[in-house]
Image (spheres, coloured by chain):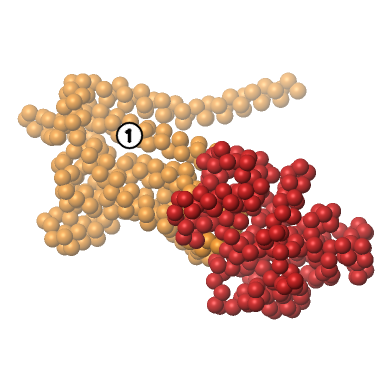
């Protein structure tokens, strides 16, 4: 299977503090990769580097090479807005805009120049269907998105990300603010989405990684300790530190 | 124990009394203005008073029409809003979203300083710089005009608009902006399509606050507007505002003239009350 992201010797500093050390990883297309590790291990930082959301933080320095479909994402030729269109993101806390459900989903396509009403209607419906929320909201598309429940808001945010037709979705602990039922709905959704998209998901919850992911990367203190098929990493971890973490000896 | 409770009650009473001083002032001013402002309106006739186009309070046959003042105040305020709001709004976006922390703090101090300058100084600078400037640039006989007042007012309302808009824009959750950027929107698109709509009640309140400041300003406009009770037919007309109509004649007025001045003050007061009600409406919505 081919890779969509390949990272070589990547380091990242916040000012003087080195948050990521020599990361090397190849993320396969149309799969789910889970990033696990204790708080502060750098997994979210690494996730946000992939669509260059870290650019927004002052004093960040990044070295090494990150390629998205064979393009260096830090090359001056790369349009960062286009990169972020290709690599969508879903945040920890559901963050729909304070506008209607329809406008939330249509925001991205409109930003990228689509104004035709019929075309927008189609995109909104397709994105909401793909995010498995269409049936719940189709009769109230003009209602404010903040009236939805937390789980619905998060699926709306996924729909919003899908509406710009990305190739890849980055999810930063997408279920940590949700109740168990909403969480399992999102997990089911994520597993359906890998038919069409490559998904990278940061999670605090090891069971979640086991349930949904194909590959798992274990981060510790800014290092990528182990990256393997999920089945392998949880059954026969190669590194002592991975074993200690997944068996609950720390973390 | 009992002594403590009595002390608590006494102190409670003192605070209540102090608080009531403010409320009493508002009530007394309101009652006084209504009582002293209404008789002249009826003596002159409400229509003649509000819609009369001529103000000649010291003529042998005095005329008390305040339409020129009402229109001047409305036009002057509207003009100040048209010029001041775009500048203040853009400045607020720049300071809240784009400026580096150093630039932001320096410029915010400058804005605060602008708010602290006494209005007589605005008037003085306007008189010495703006009025001759308008005379020369537009080649009119007298630069003391509605235009000069509009420009001075536009500058005077900037601090209110900027500060309040910044507060509203700063309060927009960062998550909204992150979500927009992560969809591939540029920062500028994000500020205009997400941050500003999310802060719109606060920004509307900023505009209303600016209206309130502009309509209530007296000293500076008296110095630059020419202070002649003309109908504001053109930007270069010398005009008189509601505020300056009261202040310029009060010292030597008597009889019906004096009563009419109170009536003008009452009209101004009603305008301000209306603006306050609108402001409260927006502030309430902002909180929700």
Instruction: Please give left or right for residue B59 compared with residue B86 in the image.
Output: left
Vertical position of residue B47 compared to residue A11: above or below: above
Point 61% across, 44% down: residue: A134
Q: Chain of mark 1?
A: B
Point 52% across, 30% down: residue: B19
Q: Which image quadrant is residue B68 in?
A: top left
List x then y, in percent, for residue B196: 48, 51
Chain depicted in orange = B
Q: Nearer the viewer, residue A218 or B207?
A: A218
* Tally of numbered tags: 1
Point 74% across, 69% down: residue: A28
Quadrant occupied by the C terminus of chain A: bottom right
List x then y, in percent, for residue A87: 63, 64
Q: Crowding near pointer 1: few (<14 within 10 Å), some, many (20+)?
A: some
Vertical position of residue B284 compared to residue B146: above or below: above
Chain depicted in red = A
SS type, badge 1: helix
Instruction: Please give left or right for residue B180 compared with residue A94 in the image.
Output: left
Point 56% across, 78% down: residue: A76
Q: Nearer the viewer, residue B283 or A27?
A: A27
What residue is pinned by disc 1? B271
List x then y, in percent, for residue B276: 41, 35
List x then y, in percent, for residue B236: 17, 52
Q: Nearer the viewer, residue B218 or A108?
A: A108
Name, please, the residue furthest toward the left.
Answer: B60
Quadrant occupied by the N terminus of chain A: bottom right
Q: Which image quadrant is residue A233 in?
A: bottom right
**Residue B132 visible to an observer of this rendering:** no
């Amino acid at each position: 299977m081919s890779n969509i992201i390949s990272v070589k010797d990547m380091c990242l500093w916040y000012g003087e503090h080195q948050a990521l050390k020599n990361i090397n990883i190849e993320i396969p297309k149309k799969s789910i990769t889970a990033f696990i590790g204790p708080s502060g291990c750098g997994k979210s930082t690494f996730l946000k580097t992939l669509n260059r959301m870290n650019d927004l933080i002052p004093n960040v320095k990044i070295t090494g090479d990150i390629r998205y479909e064979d393009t260096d994402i830090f090359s001056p030729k790369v349009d960062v807005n286009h990169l972020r269109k290709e690599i969508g993101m879903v945040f920890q806390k559901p963050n729909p805009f304070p506008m209607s459900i329809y406008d939330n989903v249509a925001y991205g396509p409109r930003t990228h120049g689509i104004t035709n009403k019929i075309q927008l209607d189609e995109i909104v419906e397709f994105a909401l269907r793909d995010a498995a929320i269409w049936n719940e909201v189709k009769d109230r598309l003009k209602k404010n998105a903040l009236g939805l429940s937390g789980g619905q808001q998060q699926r709306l945010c996924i729909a919003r990300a899908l509406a710009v037709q990305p190739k890849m979705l980055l999810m930063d602990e997408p279920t940590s603010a949700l109740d168990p039922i909403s969480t399992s709905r999102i997990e089911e959704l994520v597993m359906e989405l890998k038919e069409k998209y490559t998904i990278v998901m940061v999670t605090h919850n090891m069971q979640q990684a086991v349930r949904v992911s194909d590959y798992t990367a274990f981060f510790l203190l800014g290092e990528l300790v182990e990256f393997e098929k999920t089945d392998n990493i949880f059954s026969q971890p190669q590194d002592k530190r991975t074993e200690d973490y997944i068996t609950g000896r720390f973390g | 124990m009992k002594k403590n409770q009595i002390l608590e009650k006494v102190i409670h009473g003192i605070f209540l009394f102090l608080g009531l001083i403010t409320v009493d002032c508002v009530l007394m001013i309101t009652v006084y203005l209504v009582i002293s402002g209404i008789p002249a309106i009826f003596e002159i006739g409400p229509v003649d008073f509000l819609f009369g186009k001529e103000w000649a309070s010291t003529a042998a046959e005095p005329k008390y029409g305040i339409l020129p003042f009402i229109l001047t105040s409305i036009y002057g305020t509207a003009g100040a809003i048209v010029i001041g709001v775009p500048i203040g709004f853009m400045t607020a976006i720049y300071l809240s979203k784009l400026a580096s922390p150093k630039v932001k703090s320096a410029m915010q101090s400058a804005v605060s300083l602008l708010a602290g300058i006494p209005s007589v100084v605005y008037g003085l600078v306007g008189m010495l710089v703006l009025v001759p400037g308008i005379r020369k640039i537009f080649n009119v006989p007298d630069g003391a005009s509605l235009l000069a007042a509009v420009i001075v007012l536009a500058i005077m309302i900037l601090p209110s608009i900027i500060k309040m808009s910044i507060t509203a824009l700063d309060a927009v959750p960062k998550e909204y902006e992150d979500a927009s950027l992560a969809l591939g929107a540029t920062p500028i698109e994000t500020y205009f399509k997400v941050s500003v709509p999310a802060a719109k009640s606060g920004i509307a309140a900023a505009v209303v606050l600016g209206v309130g400041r502009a309509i209530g300003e007296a000293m500076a406009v008296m110095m630059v507007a020419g202070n002649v009770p003309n109908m504001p037919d053109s930007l270069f007309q010398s005009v008189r505002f509601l505020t300056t109509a009261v202040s310029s004649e009060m010292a030597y007025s008597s009889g019906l003239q004096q009563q009419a001045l109170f009536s003008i003050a009452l009209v101004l007061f009603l305008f301000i009350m209306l603006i306050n009600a609108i402001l409260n409406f927006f502030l309430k919505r902002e909180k929700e």
